[in-house]
């Protein structure tokens, strides 16, 4: 039988996070957006609930859940605040997951308990000022000298990289040349802070104001040879595998934002009157909201089905790309339409839809732009990648 409902465990988790999001996060969302301050107390609350450990086994301090549980939590948080949701998404799927997927037992035992408990945050340093989509254009270098990796280079737009609780930046670096003349790219665990490492000022961003995103510089940063994560030369492909999973989580975040736009629009359209009637009575408005609900529903089913394939151990690259592409575009469209439903109030920052509008655009860019998702789908269909 096809069952698209949530299991009792998943539903209980969803409700718990929903209640936390509404009672703890929502009352602070406008202030966090305005002050752009990283919400350490909310992150501590999420840590206490075990959210940072959701998809990891108990032996590493996790909750023994699965990746779908993480996605449900991210969706519920994004329904009220995208900055908090991306802090969880990046902390788990980009910070801790590479260590869990590719680390040695010693690396897991060393790093995971603090990351899965949420006491500490890890970051994922792939993008560089000169290349995001073309991640193979990595210029950061790591040379092996006297039993240590010496790392030099710059990374751009790295989430969770400069908070007071950031302890790890996993970074890709060129470690040599392959026999075919291409760059050998490896992943190195850099414990931070450390000599030679500096996290720049937080970017001034269009949205995700309370999330921590910085440029990073590595100048003769020395770490032990044992800090190589995964096989030498597999750093790039391992990071791409991490991004496959991450796209399902970003799709969940987009669904949360898209749903928030529906929720706010339904409420506003019933209350706001024009020409003596609630604006919901006008088909131009109610049909807009119907379309928003349709997009949200389809996007949710897309990420549920990508997660189901992933959990079943099947290949899910295409489904994850479809979910991320559809959900992020749905979120951007819903945010624009919700702003329209709100009229002038939609352009005023105190109204959640104005924040959702600003927060939505990055969903079509981060963890692979919409163009890159289309490229992935094209490749999965066996067509040669267009230029
Ligand atoms: C707030 C924020 C948080 C982020 N967090 C992280 C993080 O934690 N870790 C990390 O490593 N990165 C992070 N990123 C980086 C993000 O993943 C990149 O910005 C993204 O992958 C795009 O790379 P780029 O900005 O260099 O754009 P570019 O790659 O320069 O792309 C510019 C445009 O060209 C298009 N394009 C590029 N190549 C092609 C092609 N072959 N075919 C068609 N179109 C193409 C793109 O789709 C885009 O429209 C973050 C970015 C932001 C803004």
Image (cartoon, rainbow, N blue to C red):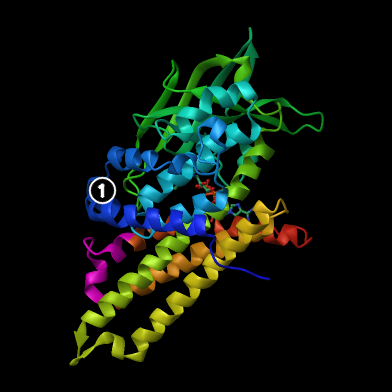
Mark 1 surroundings within 10 Å by alpha-carbon count, few (fewer than 14), some (14 through 19), many (20 or more): many
Looking at the image, residue 382 lies above or below residue 159: below
- Left or right? Give the position of 344 relative to 130: left
To which quarter of the image does residue 230 belong? top right
Quadrant of res 354: bottom left
Which of 355 and 122 lies nearest the eye of the viewer? 122
Q: Quadrant of the C terminus?
A: bottom right
Does the image show residue 131? yes
Magenta stretch: helix, strand or loop mostly: helix
- Give percent across and percent down for residue 108: 58, 27
Nearer the observer, 145 or 223: 223
Q: Which residue is mark 1?
A: 32
Residue at 35% across / 48% down in the picture? 205
Give the percent coordinates (x, y) of residue 64: 55, 41
Q: Quadrant of the N terminus?
A: bottom right
Say above or below: 319 vs 102: below
In the drawing, does residue 141 fall left or right of residue 283? right
Instruction: Give the extent of the magenta segment.
Output: 342-355
> What residue is shown at x 27% (from left), y 55% (from top)?
23
Residue found farthest to the left = 276
């Amino acid at each position: 039988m096809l069952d698209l409902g949530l299991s009792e465990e998943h539903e209980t988790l969803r409700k718990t996070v929903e209640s936390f999001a509404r009672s703890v996060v929502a009352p602070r969302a406008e202030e966090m957006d305005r002050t752009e301050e990283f919400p350490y107390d909310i992150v501590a609350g999420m840590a206490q609930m075990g959210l940072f450990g959701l998809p990891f086994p108990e032996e590493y301090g996790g909750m023994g859940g699965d990746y779908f549980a993480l996605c449900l939590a991210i969706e519920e948080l994004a329904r009220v605040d995208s900055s908090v949701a991306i802090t969880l998404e990046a902390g788990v799927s980009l910070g801790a997951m590479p260590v869990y997927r590719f680390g040695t037992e010693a690396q897991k035992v060393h790093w995971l308990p603090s990351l899965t408990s949420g006491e500490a945050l890890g970051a994922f340093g792939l993008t560089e000022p000169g290349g995001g989509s073309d991640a193979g254009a990595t210029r950061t270098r790591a040379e092996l000298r006297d039993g240590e990796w010496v790392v030099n280079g710059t990374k751009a737009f790295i989430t969770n990289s400069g908070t007071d609780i950031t302890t790890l930046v996993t970074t890709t670096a060129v470690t040599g040349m392959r026999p075919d003349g291409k760059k050998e790219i490896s992943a190195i665990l850099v414990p931070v802070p450390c000599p030679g490492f500096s996290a720049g000022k937080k970017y001034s961003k269009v949205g995700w104001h309370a999330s921590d995103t910085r440029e990073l510089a590595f100048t003769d940063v020395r770490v032990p040879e044992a800090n190589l994560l995964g096989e030498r030369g597999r750093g790039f492909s391992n990071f791409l595998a991490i991004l496959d999973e991450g796209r399902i989580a970003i799709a969940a975040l987009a669904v949360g934002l898209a749903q928030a736009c529906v929720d706010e629009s339904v409420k506003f359209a019933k209350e706001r009157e024009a020409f003596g009637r609630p604006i919901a009575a006008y088909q131009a408005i109610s049909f807009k909201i119907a379309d928003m609900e349709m997009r949200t529903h389809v996007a949710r089913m897309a990420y549920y089905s990508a997660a189901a394939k992933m959990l079943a151990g099947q290949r899910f690259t295409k489904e994850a790309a479809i979910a991320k592409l559809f959900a992020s575009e749905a979120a951007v469209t819903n945010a624009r339409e919700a702003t329209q439903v709100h009229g002038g109030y939609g352009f005023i920052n105190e109204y959640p839809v104005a924040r959702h509008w600003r927060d939505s655009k990055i969903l079509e860019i981060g963890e692979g732009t919409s163009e890159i998702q289309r490229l992935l789908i094209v490749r999965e269909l066996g067509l040669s990648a267009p230029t």
